Each structure stands twice: as C-alpha cells, then as structure tokens.
Image (tube, grey):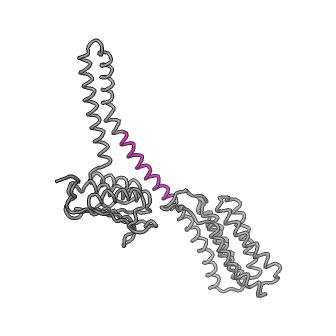
Amino acid sequence: MTTDPARAPGGRPYGPPSGAGFLAFALIGVAAAWDTAAGDSRPAWLAWPGLAAVILLYAAAVLLAFRSRTVAATVALALLGVTVTGLAALFAGGWLYLFPLAGIACGLVLAGRAVRAALLAPLLAVTAAAALVTLFTGGGLEPVMALAWGTFSAGLVVAFIMHLHALIAELAGTRRRLAETAVERERLRFARDLHDLLGHTLSVIVVKAEAVRRLAERDPEQAGRHAADIETVGRQALAEVREAVTGYREGSLNGELARAGDVLSAAGLTPDVRRTGAPPPPWVQDLLGWVVREGVTNVLRHSAATRVTITVASHSVTVHDDGPAPRKEAGEMKGSGLRGLAERVAQAGGRVEAGPAPEGGWRLRAVLPAEPPDLPGGE
C-alpha cells in the first residue's frame, strides 16, 4: 500500500495514514472482554486466548497491508474472519461486535488492489457471517440488519478513505511535476532566446577576428576596419543581451500576468486575473510585475491552493490563493523573496502585506503611492 512520496507545503507527506493509527479500532474488542470478565463468556480459558488471537490477527493484517505484503495480509485476514465467526457463534453477546472489526480489516487489506471486486467478496462473506451468527444466536431482524450493515459499511468506508488518500498523493505528485515542467520550459525558452540572439553575432565576430589575424601584417588598414566592425557588433550584442535579460528580470506587468496565467495553468491551478479602476501608470507597472511574479512563485512553492486570484488596480496588486495559510504570522517577511520585494516596494514609497486573508487562504498585496517618489539628487 505504497504511494507517491509527494509532499504538501510545510513538508507534510501526502498519503495514507499510518497503520498504527488503525490499531486503535481493536478497542472494539472491549465488549467481548467485558462479557468475559463478567463471567458471561464461558469457558474463560477459551475466551481470553480467543480474544487475544483476534486482536493479534487484526494487527497483523493491518501492519502487513501497510507494508505491501498482500499475500501475508490476506492470510491473516482469512484467519481473522474464521476466528471471529467461531468465537461469535460460541459466545454471542458482545462478541458479535468483532464482525465490524473484521470488516475494517477487509477495507484496509484489500483497498489497494486494482480489481475492486476482490474487496467485495471477503467483505460480503464477513457481512453474511455476521447476519447468520446474529440470527442463530437469537437476534431478531433489527439486530441482524444493524450488525450486517455496520460490518459492511465499516469496511466500505475504510476502503474509500484509503483510496481517497491514494488519489490525493497521486494528484499532489502530478501537480509538483507540472510545476517543475513549467519552470524547466521557461528555462529552455530563455536558453533558446539567447542562442538565437548570440549565435549569428558570435559567428560574425569569429569571422572578423580571423580576417584581422590574416590582414594584420600585409594590410593594417583593412585589418583595422575589421577590428572596428568587431567592436560595433560586440557592443550591439551586449546591448541586445542586456535588453533580453532586463525583459526577464523587469518584465512589464502585462507580460508577467500572461506568464503567471500560463505557469499556474500548467501547474493545475485556476488563474483568475481581474482589473479594477484606471490602468496603472508606467512607473508602477514594473513594480507590480515583480509582485505578481513573487506571489505566483510562492503559490507554486508553498501553497496547496487550487485557485489563484490576481487583482490589479491603478496603484496596487493583490495575489490571493485559496490554499491553507502557511504557519507564520501575518505580515512577517521570512522568505528572502518577500524581503527583497518589500525593500524594493518600500524604496518606491509603498508597502507590502503578506498573511492569511480574512476570507481564507493566503494573500500578498502591494500598495504604491499615487505619485512617483523623488529620486536622490533629483530636482
């Protein structure tokens, strides 16, 4: 019963609960122990070892199932069903409540099987045994139906719980891989852009350099012209590289919003971009673009959200996700990205707020002043 070792934000693993947690259901045997201690289950020399055998077989079936030892767990489950049926037929009373315990074991042992019909056969067998034993030990229709339904539903509910945890683990792993793919795709795009930008330019520089080397002695004037061409091409390439890198580091707000939508969609989240009020002035757009980038990065790295809402106003932007809030106090800038963002916005006279939103989820908001700040040394 293994699952994808995907992890939730904060390092918590997604997957089924531990087998030790299900051992607590062995307390169902308290009713049988009570009857035995009160002298209602005789002979006691058989009742006590029988109850111990039931608990040990249940624990073995559960722990073996969680260790993916299906064959051994199935054998323990079969022995548990036979033992419970025999003891309940012999002692009746509180021993009948051991049938739901066997039903829970069925759900745990067989929930991970690919063929779901394999779950129904033993579970229906235990349910039928519970109904027949209750009927033949003097129970009426109502007790028979109650115990049979309790046995069947206990196994079925546990099986669905285990299946749900497996799906959560699979979805978490898929989401993580999609986010990694989106980042990798962006890196490849950047590498491709640089290759296209520099490939032709560097080829020209190499050709010109070879010409300079050949003409240096016999035609210095021509070699000098080629050297000047190298300088011109090099400066142009440097300017183009700076422009390209600037486009990645300080992209426009519209570009960041478009990239955010693509990355969030690729990671399996639902992006919702909203615009209110007047369009942001040019001096605000770069900063708001940084806020969008940092907010989306934090969602992909730390949040278990399914929907991200980005609201852009004339001098503010808000990134709100519906995932559980990280365990830190509101407004506390622990991450280096948030600290750097807060410093950048503060230099422009604005402020950054980060913390749990009143309506739930996590919210990052940046507010900038209506007028640009005075630059140092300006008029």
Is residue 167 visible in the rendered image? The answer is no
Identify the residue at the far top of this view: 218
Percent coordinates x, y for residue 229 in the rendering: 25, 25
Query: Relative to residue 335, is residue 192 depicted above or below?
Result: above
Percent coordinates x, y for residue 22 in the rendering: 63, 70
Percent coordinates x, y for residue 219 in the rendering: 26, 13
- The C terminus sits in image quarter: bottom left
* 159 with respect to 225 (left or right): right
- Residue 215 part of the magenta-drawn span: no
* 340 with respect to 327 (left or right): left
Identify the residue at the far left of this view: 379
Q: Nearer the viewer, residue 139 or 193?
A: 193
Q: Nearer the viewer, residue 217 or 365?
A: 217
- The residue shown at (37%, 55%) is 265
Q: Which residues lie in the magenta part?
A: 170-191
Q: Quadrant of residue 85?
A: bottom right
Name the dominant secondary structure of the magenta segment: helix
* 210 with respect to 110 (left or right): left
Is residue 19 visible in the rendered image? The answer is yes
- The residue shown at (22%, 54%) is 375
Query: Relative to residue 70, is residue 102 depicted above or below?
Result: below
Q: Nearer the viewer, residue 107 or 126?
A: 107
Query: Relative to residue 15, is residue 191 depicted above or below?
Result: above
- The residue shown at (27%, 38%) is 240
- The N terminus sits in image quarter: bottom right
